[in-house]
Image: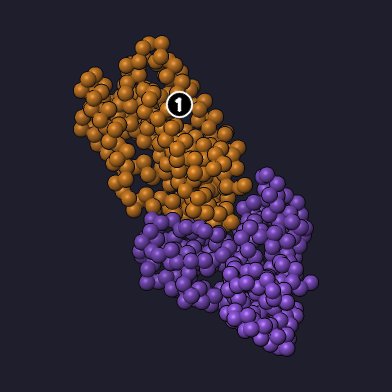
Chain colours: A purple, B orange
């Protein structure tokens, strides 16, 4: 493949009331595999997916998918991509089989091909047993898998999945990961996720985004290699850390103190023990890199 | 335009209605009560039944379609159709065809009542079908326009209900135009649904006070207007 799967240059999206969703995003994806776009709510993940799938227009900048400009050549882009939107619902009165099959037919697939692809997708996503039950009678997680099956059944070159595993139980999530890995052998899977652990274990390339800007990008191992602080100490959110001689970062998990070395870690641990505070220690992960970049902890 | 894609999307949309084949019954209750009152009071039940057929076709093409598309937008299902080879015009045609299928069941019931009560022969059937198709076409264009015009899909349902009241229940669609004072009869014929009913009356041979040319001209004018407006709407893009 000569042309990049996705090329984005200085992409800006400003919504009404001057809300800036994307603020000069640039990147290029040259190889197939899984790309995980991670970031908090409102970071611009969904807006980026919407632009790349031609659902919305950029305010400025350039977005090219498979060599086609998303604004000028939107019909070519649409014919080569497949999408799982965020917070979507399948047609509730259809069965999973009908949903996948007739969606494929609406994309112009012949009967026999649509039938074969629908069966394969339903089996791969563990939906075969419930293929003839209307979606209204299925659980939220199963409905989500119906949407994923509809998108992945399409023989597309790029799959866009916007938070596809939200609402899935851990087992179903891992089943979806397995299918995505299979799909990514021949095409590009571009997914957004809240779960840093998902991005870390699933993606070949991770793009971290915050407030409409890319804060970090690279392979999970390369990114982890960039983290100078190798340990994280997590304290209760209400812990009194005012007199501590270490920098403390507030996060969803609680208060975090990072340590660069074992020596520094033992200093922190002994001080916390003296103060009688409860804490846990583990190695840093991509989530920590993200916290550090956003909070300015490390460069 | 590729027929296979249109058929695929149309069936996708139709299946949900087919799972609830009797959903139309509640929609027919009020019109049929009006029909009985009109038939017993004035003996002009045929006029009323033609009005019901026009109302069914207009509502299905118009309001039901707009509601369906709005629901798809809220569910984000619309996004998976946009991000696909299905062109906006193909999606619009598929939506229209899906809602033509929806007319079949209630129209069959009304035609059966027509045959049993006011005695309509088979010769009138093709003309009645033409009337239904006319109303469906104009209603569809209107529904696509209404859907495209409303930025907030949550408002489509309430707007559709209001328009249903203004275009179906209040004007003389289900009840005879002749009930109105003479000066209002011509004015009412300027309402698209009334004009459609009057065209149906002319086609089937049910006498009306409004000239055929006027009803036909109003119908054609609205059909052209709504179609033009619908085509100008960006159905699925931002």
Image spot of residue A82 (x, y percent):
58, 62
Drawn side of residue A69 relative to residue A179, left or right:
right
Residue shown at the point (71%, 56%) measured from the top left: A22
Q: Nearer the viewer, residue A211 or B132?
A: A211
Using a 10 Å C-alpha cutoff, classify the residue at mark 1 as few (fewer than 14 neighbours), some (14 to 19) or many (20 or more): many
Q: Nearer the viewer, residue A50 or A131?
A: A50
Drawn side of residue A196 relative to residue B170, left or right:
right
Asked which quadrant contains residue A263, the reply is: bottom right
Q: Quadrant of the N terminus of chain A?
A: bottom right
Q: Nearer the viewer, residue A267 or A166?
A: A267
> Can residue B65 be seen here?
no
Residue shown at the point (68%, 49%) measured from the top left: A19
Q: Of helix, strand and loop, which one carries label 1?
A: helix
Image spot of residue B97 (x, y percent):
44, 45
Q: Quadrant of the C terminus of chain A?
A: bottom right
Image spot of residue A65 (x, y percent):
69, 61
Residue denoted by label 1: B192
Q: Nearer the viewer, residue A132 or A12?
A: A12
Q: Chain of mark 1?
A: B
> Can residue B174 be seen here?
yes
Asked which quadrant contains residue A207, the reply is: bottom right
Residue shown at the point (67%, 45%) measured from the top left: A16
Tally of numbered tags: 1
Image vertical order of residue B52 relative to residue B178, above or below: below
Residue shown at the point (50%, 58%) measured from the top left: A88
Image spot of residue B16 (x, y percent):
39, 52
Drawn side of residue B116 relative to residue A197, left or right:
left
Asked which quadrant contains residue A203, the reply is: bottom right
């Amino acid at each position: 493949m000569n042309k990049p799967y996705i090329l984005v240059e200085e992409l800006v999206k400003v919504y009404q009331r001057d809300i800036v969703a994307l603020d000069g995003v640039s990147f290029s994806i040259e190889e197939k595999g899984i790309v995980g776009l991670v970031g908090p709510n409102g970071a611009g993940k969904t807006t980026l997916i919407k632009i790349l799938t031609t659902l919305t227009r950029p305010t400025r900048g350039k977005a090219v998918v498979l060599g086609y400009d998303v604004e000028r050549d939107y019909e070519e882009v649409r014919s080569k991509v497949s999408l799982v939107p965020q917070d979507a619902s399948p047609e509730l009165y259809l069965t999973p089989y009908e949903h996948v099959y007739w969606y494929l037919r609406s994309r112009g697939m012949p009967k026999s091909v649509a039938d074969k692809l629908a069966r394969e997708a339903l089996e791969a996503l563990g939906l075969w047993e419930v293929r003839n039950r209307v979606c209204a009678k299925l659980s939220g997680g199963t409905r989500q898998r119906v949407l994923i099956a509809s998108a992945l059944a399409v023989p597309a070159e790029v799959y866009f999945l916007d938070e596809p595993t939200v609402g899935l139980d851990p087992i179903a999530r891992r089943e979806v990961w397995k299918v995505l890995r299979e799909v990514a052998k021949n095409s590009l899977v571009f997914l957004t996720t809240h779960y840093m652990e998902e991005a870390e274990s699933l993606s070949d390339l991770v793009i971290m985004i915050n407030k409409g800007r890319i804060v970090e990008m690279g392979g999970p191992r390369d990114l982890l290699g960039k983290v100078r602080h190798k340990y994280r100490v997590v304290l209760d959110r209400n812990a009194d850390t005012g007199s501590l001689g270490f920098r403390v970062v507030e996060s969803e998990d609680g208060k975090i103190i990072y340590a660069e070395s074992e020596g520094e870690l033992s200093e922190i641990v002994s001080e916390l023990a003296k103060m009688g505070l409860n804490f846990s220690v583990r190695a840093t992960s991509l989530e920590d890199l993200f916290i550090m970049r956003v909070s300015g902890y490390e460069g | 335009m590729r027929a296979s894609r249109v058929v695929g999307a149309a069936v996708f949309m139709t299946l949900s209605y087919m799972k609830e084949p009797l959903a139309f019954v509640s929609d027919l209750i009020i019109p049929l009560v009006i029909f009985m009152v009109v038939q017993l009071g004035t003996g002009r039940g045929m006029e009323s039944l033609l009005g019901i057929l026009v109302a069914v076709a207009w509502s299905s093409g118009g309001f039901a379609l707009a509601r369906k598309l709005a629901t798809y937008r809220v569910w984000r299902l619309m996004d998976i159709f946009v991000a696909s080879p299905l062109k906006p015009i193909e999606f619009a045609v598929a939506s229209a065809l899906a809602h033509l299928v929806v007319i079949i069941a209630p129209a069959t019931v009304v035609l059966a009542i027509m045959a049993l009560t006011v005695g309509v022969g088979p010769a009138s059937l093709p003309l009645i079908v033409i009337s239904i198709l006319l109303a469906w076409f104009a209603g569809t264009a209107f529904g696509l326009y209404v859907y495209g015009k409303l930025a907030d899909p949550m408002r489509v349902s309430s707007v559709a209900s209001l328009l249903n009241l203004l275009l179906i229940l209040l004007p003389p669609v289900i009840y005879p135009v002749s009930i109105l004072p003479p000066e209002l009869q011509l004015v009412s014929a300027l309402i698209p649904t009334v004009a459609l009913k009057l065209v149906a009356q002319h086609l089937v041979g049910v006498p009306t006070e409004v000239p055929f040319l006027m009803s036909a001209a109003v119908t054609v004018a609205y059909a052209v207007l709504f179609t033009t407006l619908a085509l100008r709407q960006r159905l699925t893009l931002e």
